[in-house]
Image (cartoon, rainbow, N blue to C red):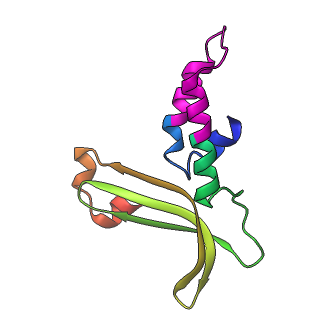
Amino acid sequence: MGACNFFCRSLPRTQFLLKALAEESSNVDFKGSEKVDEAVMKLKEIFKQEGMTFHPIPGPNEEYLLAVDSSIDGFGAVFGMGKYEEQKIKNFKPVAFGSGGFENKLKLESSRNREL
């Protein structure tokens, strides 16, 4: 479950499966269940398919990159690694995603300040 917790940031669907596993395995008399077996199999499939399960240490020709955007109501961001050349990003590998909404006070700020 430790590796799943680490990659949960870049594989958002895993958090729901981890919740089911944590609830089932927190029982002192845990003996396994069909629910746990199903969650483990789904996690294995997600890890096989995603291609984003790597440790986020950039290689010699890579650097960390952060892209943000906001609107009146909310924001989104992606953090990753890649190479920035001639105003283009090459070989981008996402590491984590984030998004959310603004409180009423922040909705009055400029878009520049909201993206900061």
- Residue 63 % position (x, y): 66, 72
Question: In screen coordinates, is 82 left or right of 99?
Answer: right
Question: In screen coordinates, is 37 left or right of 59?
Answer: left
Screen quadrant of the C terminus: bottom left
Query: Residue 39 lies in magenta, yes or no?
Result: yes
Question: In screen coordinates, is 7 left or right of 115?
Answer: right
Camera-side residue of 70 and 26: 26
In the image, farthest residue toward the top = 29
Q: Residue at x 52, y 87 (%)?
A: 87
- Residue 96 % position (x, y): 55, 55
Query: Residue 13 lies in magenta, yes or no?
Result: no
In the image, farthest residue toward the right = 60
Q: Residue at x 72, y 56 (%)?
A: 55
Screen quadrant of the N terminus: top right
Q: Residue at x 73, y 62 (%)?
A: 57
Instruction: Report the span colored magenta.
Output: 17-41
Camera-side residue of 102 and 77: 77
